[in-house]
């Protein structure tokens, strides 16, 4: 079925105005307590009000490392899509697209139509998002090559596409960047011909001026800064140096040790621009995180999750979730781009090793049946630089798991990753989702003061190898739990509800509030749960288009009787745009009365208590004969 491009939610819980979408959502979860060695489960519910501003801004993205493989590839991708380019290859003619992007190529199920078929819509249609073709790019790089020359140096794109893009990219030139030799590999010095001079304080001020200049000259409403430059060595966290916002700012003024990426993060936060770290080093030291909290500016990281690690976060979740005890994970990869050259230096490789090996931690900790406290798999990561393979990274993985009765199971995978073509759509999603989160606010019945998400935007964990989470919040690496988090948040804002077939995603941190909401739920101060999947004691909620056929399907697919079914109350008179889908939330406690009129085209569903013919009585004899 063709994906619909627009939909409208018909519900008393949703109000559309020219300025915003306001939606009421009842979040049901559970609290646990231990009494005498017994876990007691207490269902809880909280009423949320979400408000999403509908006005989409003119958005600029500044890339640190704009002239690198990732930066030049992302810029080329947006230009190619904006210009609707196509080009010949040895396998046929290709057209520009956004494959690999969750927001642009991923879909979400809305529910079932009259024939019992699922209806899917693009992720980007759940809430108003910036169109990627409208993005405006700028950035910094220690290399002075213009973007056309950088694209040719990267050797990522087909020659026919490069030729068409050359006149559009030749005029794009990176601004000078910060170069501190001790933080990146010595083999990068030959590139460093475009640097910001002066002290650390002077460099910080120049970055801030660059951001302001870009915002004003391009007529932008918002700017997001994204680090896609070289992997740096780790920066030691030292009390009095970078442990608080005050100490970090003083360190910069005194010219003491601070990494280039942290300088960019601080400059972005001071300018009110979200900062996202696409490399594995600890850019967002405690002082930077505290500064982001003080300024209420979003930050996210670390390290784009594109190839081998993304597969690992799926496969280990599958193995442990299947009851297999994974005891050995060995990951080898070699690549020949500049990232691989920089990672050939031990300090920079160590940063990458940390982000790659931490990806299975939460999956191991989730199963105390398999793993005793402190027990974890052997996990080895090897990266080698092989110039000939260029941007086409090779990854080999071996997973060995224990079986019952002393057996073992070994899986071996080979994965060829087009590194920058996988990273570019991730960068796109990071910018679009971060901007969307800036337009979402919420409150609860307990705390009516409007709040935003926590400045550490853990919702972006799906896109990062080592996702940052607010202090005291758990880190989730399992890929589909991360995806469910994004989907559930975006579904709740227009009150679509959580799909009943999905996992119960338990995350804390993304929706951490400013007031007392988290404390009042018995959780850590300034912390409350992610909006999540079905909870014990809650009624199933979903969406449908008309209900009688859905009910029969539900009884067989979900093993439920009586199945959920609202009644049909009236026809919709609204003129909908082409390919629009009309969706109505549906409860589970009522059955359609035989006297209710049959469904008609474009009919909408209303809550059953709006129909005088409906009854809460449940028929134990099975589905009525008219459910065809």
Image (cartoon, rainbow, N blue to C red):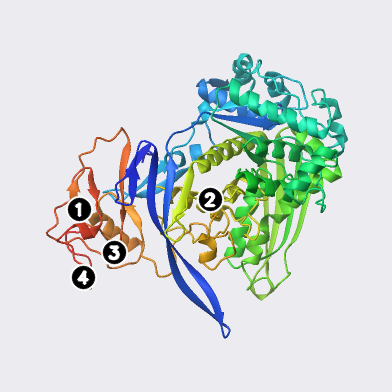
- 141 or 204: nearer the eye? 204
Q: Which residue is mark 3?
A: 563
- Pointer 4: residues within 10 angstroms few (<14), some, or many (20+)? few
Q: Residues within 10 Å of mark 3 (few under 14, many from 20)?
A: many
The residue carrying mark 2 is: 483
User: Which SS class for mark 3?
Assistant: loop
Q: Disc 1 marks which residue? A: 568
Q: Is residue 103 left or right of residue 574?
A: right
Q: Which secondary structure lies at badge 1?
A: strand
- Name the spot of residue 612 as percent of width and height, x first: 15, 60
Q: Residue at x 51, y 20 (%)?
A: 83
Quadrant housing the N terminus: top left
- Residue 341: percent from the left, percent from the top? 81, 35
Earlier-in-chain disc, 4 versus 3: 3
Quadrant of the frame with the C terminus: bottom left
Please indicate, yes or no, whether residue 414 appears anywhere in the rendered image: no
Q: Which mark is residue 617?
A: 4
Instruction: Tell me if mark 1 has few (under 14), some (14-19) or many (20+) residues whose alpha carbon lies within 10 angstroms of its own.
Output: many
In this rendering, which labeled residue sits more in front, label 3 or label 1?
Answer: 1
């Amino acid at each position: 079925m063709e994906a619909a491009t627009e939909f409208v939610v018909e519900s008393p819980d949703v109000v559309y105005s020219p300025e915003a979408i306001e939606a009421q959502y009842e979040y049901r979860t559970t609290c646990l307590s231990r009494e005498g060695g017994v876990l007691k489960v207490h269902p809880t519910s909280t009423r949320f009000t979400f408000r999403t501003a509908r006005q989409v801004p003119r958005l600029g993205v500044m890339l640190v490392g704009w002239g690198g493989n990732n930066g030049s590839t992302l810029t080329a991708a947006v230009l190619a899509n904006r210009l609707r380019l196509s080009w010949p290859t040895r396998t046929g003619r290709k057209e520009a697209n956004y494959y690999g992007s969750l927001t642009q190529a991923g879909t979400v199920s809305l529910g079932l139509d009259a024939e019992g078929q699922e209806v899917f819509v693009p992720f980007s249609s759940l809430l108003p998002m910036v169109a990627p073709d409208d993005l405006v790019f700028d950035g910094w790089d220690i290399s002075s090559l213009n973007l056309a020359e950088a694209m040719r140096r990267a050797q990522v794109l087909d020659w026919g596409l490069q030729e068409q893009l050359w006149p559009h990219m030749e005029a794009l030139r990176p601004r000078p960047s910060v170069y501190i030799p001790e933080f990146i590999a010595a083999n990068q010095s030959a590139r460093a011909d475009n640097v910001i001079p002066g002290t650390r304080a002077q460099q910080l001020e120049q970055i801030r001026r660059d951001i302001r200049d870009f915002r004003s000259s391009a007529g932008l409403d918002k700017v997001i800064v994204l680090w896609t430059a070289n992997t740096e060595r780790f920066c030691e966290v030292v009390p009095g140096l970078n442990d608080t916002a005050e100490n970090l700012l003083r360190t910069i003024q005194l010219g003491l040790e601070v990494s280039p990426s942290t300088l960019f993060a601080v400059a972005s936060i001071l300018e009110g621009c979200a900062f996202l770290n696409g490399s594995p080093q600890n850019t967002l030291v405690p002082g930077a995180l505290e500064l982001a909290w003080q300024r209420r500016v979003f930050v996210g990281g670390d390290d784009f999750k594109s190839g081998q690690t993304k597969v690992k976060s799926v496969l280990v979740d599958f193995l442990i979730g299947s009851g297999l005890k994974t005891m050995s994970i060995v990951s080898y990869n070699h690549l020949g781009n500049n990232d691989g050259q920089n990672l050939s230096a031990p300090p920079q490789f160590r940063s990458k090793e940390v982000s790659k090996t931490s990806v299975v931690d939460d999956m191991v900790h989730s199963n105390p049946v398999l793993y005793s406290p402190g027990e974890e798999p052997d996990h080895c990561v090897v990266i080698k630089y092989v110039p000939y393979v260029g941007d086409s990274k090779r990854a080999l993985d071996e997973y060995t798991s224990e079986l019952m009765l002393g057996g073992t199971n070994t899986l071996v995978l080979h994965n060829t990753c087009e590194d920058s073509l996988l990273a570019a759509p991730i960068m796109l999603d990071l910018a679009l989702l971060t901007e969307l989160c800036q337009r979402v606010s919420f409150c609860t019945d307990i705390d009516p003061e409007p709040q935003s998400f926590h400045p550490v935007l853990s919702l972006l964990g799906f896109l990062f190898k080592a996702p940052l989470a607010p202090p005291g919040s758990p880190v989730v690496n399992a890929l589909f739990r991360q995806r469910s988090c994004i989907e559930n948040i975006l579904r709740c804002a227009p009150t679509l509800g959580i799909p009943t077939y999905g996992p119960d995603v338990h995350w804390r941190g993304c929706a951490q509030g400013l007031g007392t909401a988290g404390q009042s739920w018995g959780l850590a101060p300034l912390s409350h749960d992610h909006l999540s999947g079905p909870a014990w004691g809650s009624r199933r909620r979903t969406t449908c288009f008309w209900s009688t056929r859905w009910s029969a399907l539900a009884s067989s697919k979900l093993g439920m009787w009586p199945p959920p079914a609202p009644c049909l109350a009236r026809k919709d008179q609204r003129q909908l745009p082409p390919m629009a889908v009309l969706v109505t939330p549906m409860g589970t406690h009522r059955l359609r009365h035989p006297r209710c009129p049959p469904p008609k085209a474009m009919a909408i569903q209303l809550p059953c208590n709006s129909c005088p013919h409906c009854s809460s009585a449940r028929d134990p004899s099975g589905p009525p004969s008219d459910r065809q």
